[in-house]
Amino acid sequence: MNTDRLIAYFSMEIALELEMPTYCGGLGILAGDTLRAAADGQLPVAAISLLHRKGYFCQQLAADGSQTEHSCEWEIGNFLKELPARASVVISGRTVHIRAWQYDVKGAKGAVVPVYLLDTDLPENAEWDRRITDHLYGGDEWYRLCQEIVMGIGGVRMLRELGHRNLTRYHMNEGHASLLAMELLDEEALAAGRETFNHDDVESVRRKCVFTTHTAVPAGHDRFPLDMVAAALGRTEVGEMREIFCCGGSLNMTYLALNLSHYVNGVAKKHSEVSRRMFAGYKIHDITNGIHAPTWVAPSFQRLYDRYSPGWREDNFNLRHALSFPAEEVWEAHAEAKAALLDRVNHETNAGMETNVLTFGFARRIADYKRADLLLYDLERLKSIACQIGPFQVVFAGKAHPGDAVGRETIRKIFRAIEALKGHVRLAYLTNYDWELARLMTAGVDVWLNTPLPPLEASGTSGMKAAVNGVPSLSILDGWWIEGCIEGTTGWAIGSLLRLADPAQTTPLDAASLYDKIEKVVIPLYYNERDRFLDVMRHAIALNGAYFTTQRMLLQYVLSAYF
Ligand SMILES: *Cc1c(COP(=O)(O)O)cnc(C)c1O
């Protein structure tokens, strides 16, 4: 049984189904899209994550944009199969029992990638321990460490209990999973009849592990104080083998993964360059992220692709034929996707958006460096563009992390702009950005906007979802867009070329560049040169939709990292 899997994929979040709140944002969507591509490609993968009984959170917004959060309720039994296997870890001297629930990701040809979601809510556990697998990115540092122990160490043990004995690769999707490498070290030592591991064990574990780092934001890398780790795990060698585990007096999950992996990569070429500077001395490769095309293509475009590029689902590169699709039919498919979005917008917000007006979309986690409010930097300028050059409307969405005061204020600021621009520019903010809303928005706007502060955007994937629906990006040159942008052909670059000592000082310059491009290029093209706009749409599909997929991405992992 279960001896056929060769690759174990560990991720703190995985978006598996619309109704399962087991993800927060881009990382979880990427993990889900990766596993969907693995199932399509019949790759021998099994995945580990946590159950997240209470999910991340559902967002509610008051009339002034104040965010409140409530936990998501979902019927676990409707989606998952409980497995009889049990594993355990010891935390603070208490045994924490772990159960697994199985979800099968089904591929286009019927192959299955099993995902095991770990759950500590068992009556034999202490009350606090039963809650360890409840909240994704909730709680404090101690709670997070306990979650990572359950996922990393408990995950390896659960795979053994489930009979996966032939695993030759362990892929850590971000550093949350790094403790799996510590468990593999213990296994090596045990197999050799030793009590503690040595440098030979380190070498054999390195051969098995692959690590993908996902953020260029320093605070995004987990680290835990050594005394906290000792209290949780009751072991001291973490401090003794400093060169493997530590950095500045703490257990650094990124360094742990870097030291115990034979292949390490960033998620775009630029991000790998930035990571090489952050982690000097390590060889960091690049494999640019992608999306699972069949998951993200709107129904109207699915029909178009089925008609003109049959086989695009099996081989996404077929979408390069988009250059020869009839322009009117591309426009019709887009009009259908746009109507679906604007229906939702008008129904939910009463914004009165119109289908013949140029529509921009911006949606992502509301984190400071993403600068959701860059477009709103100068409201007078926006009014004058709308009045003198041509009308446009903007749809926003995104959740702020509950503890992020700056992000919460950014949402209120956007709500104030909605009021201030009434009668001039229609803006709307949709609540509870999730996978379903992302599908509607990335396909339904005319131009996808992204305005992060460089060099902090690791990759970004929402622009890829837009591209595969013929929606060009208007974006800062950072992350994947450096690879995807051909100016005036797949979309447009914005942003100051000046790099100041304090990068935030470029914000006014970046805003000015954004306004210039909207005024001089995007609005005139949209209203006056529809044929050329449709050329850009088709190039977005052919050059970017065909390429920035998890199918291409997994092929690169297979060739470079897995085998
Ligand atoms: C795609 C997606 C993201 C990530 O988008 P970015 O462009 O990387 O910010 C986040 N949340 C949801 C719901 C998504 O679908």
Image (cartoon, grey):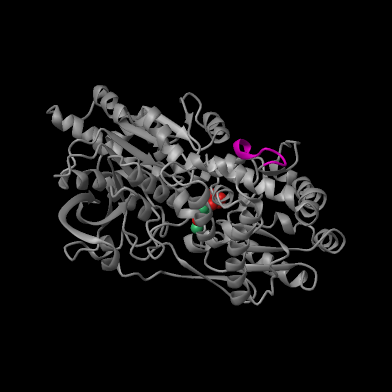
Q: Compared with residue 431, is residue 446 higher up or lower down, i.e. above or below? A: above
Q: Is residue 486 magenta?
A: yes
> 502 or 489: which is nearer to us?
489
Q: Main secondary structure of the magenta part?
A: loop
What quarter of the picture does the C terminus occupy? top left
Q: How many marks?
A: 0
Q: Quadrant of residue 237?
A: top left
- Residue 480 seen anywhere in this rendered image of the structure: no
Q: Is residue 142 magenta?
A: no
The residue at the point 55 percent across, 62 percent down is 440
In this rendering, position of residue 333 left or right of residue 474? left
**Where residue 559 appears, x then y in whole percent?**
39, 28
The residue at the point 58 percent across, 52 percent down is 466
> Which residues, given as a range, are shown in magenta?
482-489
Q: Compared with residue 499, is residue 406 higher up or lower down, i.e. above or below? A: below
The residue at the point 68 percent across, 65 percent down is 414
**Where residue 490 appears, x then y in whole percent?**
66, 43
Q: Quadrant of residue 503?
A: top right
**Where residue 60 appears, x then y in whole percent?**
53, 72
- Residue 328 seen anywhere in this rendered image of the structure: yes
The residue at the point 59 percent across, 64 percent down is 336
